Amino acid sequence: MKPPRGRRGRPAPTGPRAKFSQLLPYLFEHKKVLSVVIVLSVLGAAASLAQPLLVSQVITIVQANDPLGSLVGALIALVVISGLISGYQHYLLQRTGEGVVLSSRRKLVSRLLRLPISEFDARRTGDLVSRVGSDTTLLRAVLTQGLVEAIGGSLTFIGALIAMLIIDPVLLGLTVLVIAVSVVTVTLLSQRIRTASTAAQVKVGDLAASVERAISAIRTVRASNATEREVAVIEEDARGAWRMGIKVAKISALVVPIAGIAMQVSFLVVLGVGGFRVASDAITIADLVAFILFLFLMIMPLGQFFGAITSVNSALGALGRIQEIIDLPAEDQFDREIAPLAMTVGAANEKVRPEAAAISFENVHFGYAVAPVEIDAATDAASPVDDTADSAAATGPRPVLTDVSFSAPRGLRTALVGPSGAGKSTILALIERFYDVSDGTVRLGGLDIRSLDRTALRAQIGYVEQDAPVLAGSLRDNLTLATPDATDEDCIKVLHAVNLGEVLDRDPAGLGAAVGESGVKLSGGERQRLAIARALLAAPPILLLDESTSSLDGKNEQMMREAIDAVAADRTLIVIAHRLSTVVDSDQIVVLDHGQVVGVGTHSELVVSTPLYRDLAKHQLLV
């Protein structure tokens, strides 16, 4: 594990800013429900606006000593109807808000899992998780506490404004003057809210990334006595999130009381001036009471409007971080420009030339196009794709492979050997098209792999990574990742082939046995064997094995080789190994050094022809 970096490599607490128009598609997805909400808002506004008029009539009738008749009953009915409408409207808004959160999460996850691998190299896992979990939640508030309520409240506001104009234009003018000052103040504060909210979400992403970083390597942290240092790093990120949260709270605290102050000042002005106008017979007491009630009805939507400004600006800050990911190009977005007629699985099988090498590299050049800070940030959340990535992190983009040419014959075993940092894992990554070559060509069966649909390409390949990742879930979930239609019998057979039968036996759930987060319930060797079993179950024509037996003891390694040999009789294997003893019997060995091929041949040939290979063999007592 790398030492804590403190603030090094962290992004500044700013982020992309979304436009208000980018919120609209999320709302339009629920336009039918929102139409009902707007209708309810109109009805609710009408019911609310009718109440002061009825109260005014009641006062007038009481002053005249006339019978009230059904006015009191009508007033009670209006209050009840208004409450029912408000409750149902609130439910619909909450439901729609959850729908917006679901929609945004689906879009975000759909794009997230289709991003180029280079994006995951440059970003922290915890920050990406925070965008899915935390940022999307803020979009709910724009509906439940913001935009739609403000739209509904505006109807009440306008209705009250008209009624107040009819009752007394003078009192209305004084009221509008007070309210205008408060609106201008809130508008000036709104931009600060959006900026602070965006920064706060970035800080929350930093915190999530730090927590994920420490938990994912908790055993290493404990063994290194680094717990206190990691706690300090996480606490600093937590304090950073707290500071930005306090900043948002301070600005919001300026906004929220403004509506209350505006109402109190307006009420005092109306009460004082209105009392004077009643005394001068300009208006009646009933008119003044009705005006005050309309004032309350007007101020309440004003509070909703101010709340909407806070909610919308917070949502826009979060939406900016969401859209940043959604707007990134998917892994295959530009494939059609490279190969307009990219072949599917069936077409690829028809075009592959049987006499051609299974895999061939022709004058391939490649370098990781990731800036140093980006790689540095990425190392918090994920290990580098290749054993050259650490060097790349130190110097930025630089050549990793230079003029690499070799062929892996069909149906034979080709081994890639060389010192750490030679570019071996990068070669496998290029075959899988996790990255595209900078120059040169990689071919599968004589076809440029860029002419193949990525799904078609990967259907031909089984890939076992160096660290043999295991997904949380069951044995079956992990085995059938590439072959969801595999039967239990096939799964059990392949598990026994890689000597994982005891894993089945020790849990009554069998294939349904949970493997724990990242396969924590399995040993390192068991995780590696499970990854190999997954590749063997798919039975692809090409197998890529990156140090696939590094965690196995001698007995299990021998069983693994026998299992691989059994299924690889008519398949092409490309194997990476540091222990030459595991590949000395390969049909072909490719020796790499500093991203270049320095030798190709069998073990006996390379011992004679290639000094680097001879030195490696001597150090491992093979010559």
Image: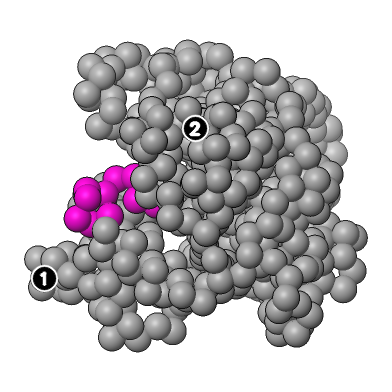
Query: Quick check: 176 left or right of 444?
Result: right
User: On the rendered image, what quadrant is the N terminus found in?
Assistant: top left
**Label 1 SS:** helix
Indicate the position of residue 329 as horizontal and vertical percent values: 76, 51
320 magenta-colored:
no
Which residue is more in the foreground, 375 or 420?
420
Q: Residue 524: which disc?
A: none
Bin the neighbour count of mark 1 within 10 Å (Cα to Cα): few under 14, some 14-19, many 20 and up.
Answer: few
The dominant secondary structure in magenta is loop
User: On the rendered image, what quadrant is the C terminus found in?
Assistant: top left
Query: Quick check: 568 left or right of 142?
Result: left
Q: Residue furthest front?
A: 608
In the depicted structure, whether residue 48 falls above or below residue 343: above
Q: Residue 505: which disc?
A: 1
**Label 2 SS:** helix
Which residue is more in the foreground, 197 or 583?
583
**Whether residue 279 can be seen here:** no
Which comes before the other along the chain, label 1 or label 2? 1
Query: Mark 2 — residue?
Result: 614
**Which quadrant would residue 498 be assigned to in this image?**
bottom left
For the point 82% across and 71% down, the residue is: 342
Which residue is more in the foreground, 528 or 613?
613
User: Residues in magenta?
Assistant: 548-557
